Image (spheres, rainbow, N blue to C red):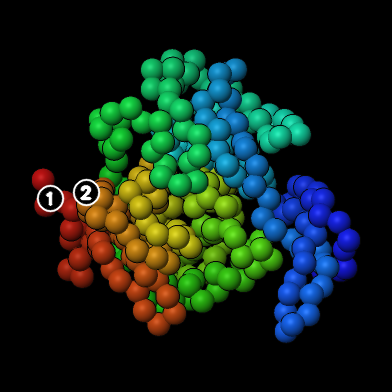
Amino acid sequence: MSSASHTEAHEQSDGLATVAIERWQQQESQLLFDDVADEQPVALVYNGISYAVMMATPCQLEAFALGFSLSEGLIADASELYSIDIEAHDNGHEVQLRIAAQRMAELKERRRNLAGRTGCGLCGTESLDQAIRPTSPVVSVDLPSQAAIQHAIVTMENHQPLQNQTGALHGAGWCDLNGEIHLLCEDIGRHNALDKLIGSLSQQQVYLPNGFALISSRASYEMVQKACSAGISTLVAVSAPTSLAIKMASEAGLNLVGFARPGRFIIYNRSVQPNGNPEHANRT
């Protein structure tokens, strides 16, 4: 930081905005510059029709748009997304996506107003039937080892440069079975961070049963739903899961771990028991 005498902020393309602040510490006041998390509206427009406006960190927007399209079931495969064009505006970003005609027809049938998804994730849903979408089963795999989970937890901070600079961003990381983090995406919204990760994994054609996702937030229903829709077999969350998230993880065969902190974590669902049998195979 350096001294400053005005309060005008300027936007950057790296997920940060620089603002002038007054810091009070040890009975002294200083005028400084500080980096804060960039938060802007991001409109997702499919074949010319606006579908959702999200408050997001405007970086990795191609991965975000692809991941959102996949995790929301708007497309079944990345091949159904033909092009992505990103337009910067004074008041935010617009992401123009061109998708297959059949998927666009289905999108029109279920079109919802999803503004403000950084919070509940279901804003604009009109009925109970719309609120909970079916979740496809995932490939059942053994729970990652305790050592792998712990290694990922203690090294996650090293992969979150924006969070380290601002203290305001969530992270969603992809870890191999040794707990090494190979990808990590950041955003002010936990849903957005996971969508960015899902998009990045799709772009790189990662084989998902050979690793696990680590998120810096709670594991709500929608985080589990997004993980399952992407084919992720294990989700590890720093904070708590919800009852519906646990139920859906059990039904889908997703390994679900919560309260993952140094030296401890809680297993809420294990898809393969120590005897090698998939736990969810006997569920009705």
Locate the N terminus and report the quarter of the image it occupies: bottom right
Name the residue nearer the viewer: 206 or 220.
220
Name the residue nearer the viewer: 21 or 205.
21
The x, y position of residue 205, in whole percent, is 53, 46
- Which residue appears at 82% of the width and 51% of the height? 8
The answer to whether residue 14 shows anywhere in this view is yes
Q: CA distance from mark 2 to mark 1?
A: 7 Å
Mark 1 element type = loop
**Residue picked out by circle 1:** 283
Q: Is residue 85 left or right of residue 179?
A: right
Residue 5, disc: none
Q: Amino acid at mark 2?
A: Glu
The x, y position of residue 85, in whole percent, is 68, 29
Residue 251, disc: 2
Mark 2 element type = helix
Badge 1 local density, few (<14 within 10 Å), some, or many (20+)? few
- Which residue appears at 16% of the width and 51% of the height? 281
The x, y position of residue 124, in whole percent, is 40, 31
